[in-house]
């Protein structure tokens, strides 16, 4: 057994990690929609999910170390200055330079010192958490390499915490439109091939079977998944007052939607002989959702019933299997698996916003979707 850190020292270190990770989740959620590069957008969505879960684990460890886990004081001046620089970034590239060139390297260095100094038996819970956290942060720097700047002078983890003080989070201005790579054509009407009749055909949702139709259809689905990820990220960023579990749920849904976009990206390349950017996209639907308040966004975007979601995907899957397109059909199986918790997100947090009244939330869903109660049943 080694002397290691005492409980209070360990709590101070975890408090500093909390502030870095919370800020990374908050600012990353704000900038994701404004980052035009597709590959960077993919990485940001993945890393947001990692960091949000890490905050939850750090909060749990703070609770175990007898420290207020909901908000453990404010960071010291040196860390505050670095966080302020990230919050004041004028564009996504500048934010990434600070987040991945300064904040994450300083966090990794502090964790390394913490791991070297703790007693691996007495403080084994911290050992396990910090080992996972270090590996995640190192992977992030590998996946999204940014020129490193000299890390924060000294040991970030050892900086004092200003008790009973609060650091307010900076909220970016409202979005106009999400950013896309220069090779993607954005027009007011989007892809003119994708008419309403293509999606709705009588009592059944239309499933494209013609090869050219499928190319446009899946290209449009990929764009819809990107927009969904951007909306979920902005839900989190613009509402820091919500409970932390809300931000974890939004980060998970953002990551799900980003993965769905990646799936469609690969599917178009491997199965449909087309690429992202082959057809124009538009942001009319994104704007219509983004213009709503948080309750409206949850009710309209996450308000599809599980039964409707299951029916829609199972119908598409059957049609595609009958066409011999098993690989494409498999995509819908995985999309279905993710859609159920997304519906739960809407109900859980929409109900929260309405003081716990689930009936009021369901009424809000019907109002926005113009669905009579009898039809919903």
Image (cartoon, grey):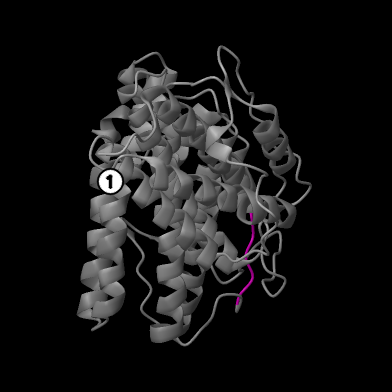
Residue at figure coordinates x 44%, y 27% from the top left: 9
* Residue 63, visible in the rendered structure: yes
Residue 104, x across and y down, in percent: 56, 51
Q: Is residue 282 magenta?
A: yes
Residue 364, x across and y down, in percent: 42, 25
Give the magenta part as a residue range. 279-285
* Residue 174, visible in the rendered structure: no
Instruction: Pick the residue in front: 345 or 293.
Output: 345
* Image height of 293 relative to 229, above or below: above
Residue 74 left/right relative to 218: right
Identify the residue under disc 1.
340
Mark 1, other Cα within 10 Å: few <14 / some 14–19 / many ≥20: some
Q: Residue furthest front?
A: 2
* Image height of 219 relative to 123, above or below: below
* Image height of 89 relative to 150, above or below: above
Residue 64 in which image quadrant: top left
Residue at figure coordinates x 56%, y 43% from the top left: 24
Residue 236, x across and y down, in percent: 52, 36
Instruction: Pick the residue in front: 210 or 14.
Output: 14
Q: Residue furthest bottom?
A: 273
Q: Residue furthest right?
A: 90
Q: Is residue 281 magenta?
A: yes
Disc 1 element = helix
Image quadrant in which the N terminus is located: top left
* Image height of 38 relative to 10, above or below: below
Residue 74 in which image quadrant: top right
């Amino acid at each position: 057994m080694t002397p290691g850190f005492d409980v209070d020292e360990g709590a101070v270190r975890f408090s500093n990690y909390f502030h870095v990770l919370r800020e990374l989740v908050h600012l990353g959620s704000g900038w994701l929609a404004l980052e035009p590069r597709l590959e960077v957008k993919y990485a940001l969505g993945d890393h947001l999910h990692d960091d949000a879960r890490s905050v939850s684990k750090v909060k749990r460890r703070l609770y175990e170390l007898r420290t207020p886990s909901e908000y453990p004081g404010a960071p010291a001046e040196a860390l505050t200055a670095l966080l302020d620089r990230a919050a004041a970034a004028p564009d996504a590239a500048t934010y990434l330079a600070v987040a991945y060139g300064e904040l994450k390297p300083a966090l990794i260095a502090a964790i390394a010192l913490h791991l070297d100094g703790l007693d691996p038996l007495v403080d084994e819970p911290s050992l396990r958490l910090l080992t996972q956290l270090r590996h995640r942060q190192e992977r992030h720097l590998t996946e999204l390499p940014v020129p490193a700047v000299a890390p924060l002078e000294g040991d970030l983890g050892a900086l004092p915490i200003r008790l009973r003080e609060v650091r307010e989070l900076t909220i970016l201005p409202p979005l106009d439109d999400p950013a896309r790579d220069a090779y993607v054509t954005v027009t007011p009407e989007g892809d003119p091939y994708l008419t309403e009749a293509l999606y709705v055909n009588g009592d059944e949702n239309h499933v494209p079977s013609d090869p050219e139709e499928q190319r446009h259809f899946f290209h449009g689905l990929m764009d819809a998944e990107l927009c969904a990820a951007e909306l979920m990220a902005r839900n989190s960023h613009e509402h820091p007052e919500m409970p932390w579990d809300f931000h974890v749920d939004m980060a998970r849904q953002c990551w799900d939607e980003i993965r769905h976009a990646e799936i469609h990206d690969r599917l178009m390349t491997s199965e449909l002989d087309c690429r992202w950017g082959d057809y124009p996209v538009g942001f009319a639907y994104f704007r219509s959702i983004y213009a709503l308040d948080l309750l409206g966004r949850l009710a309209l975007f996450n308000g599809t019933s599980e039964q409707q979601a299951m029916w829609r995907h199972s119908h598409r899957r059957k049609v595609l299997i009958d066409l011999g397109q098993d690989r494409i059909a498999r995509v819908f199986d995985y999309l279905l698996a993710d859609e159920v918790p997304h519906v739960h997100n809407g109900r859980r947090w929409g109900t929260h916003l309405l003081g716990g009244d689930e009936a009021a939330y369901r009424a809000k869903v019907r109002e926005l979707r113009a669905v009579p109660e009898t039809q919903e049943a």
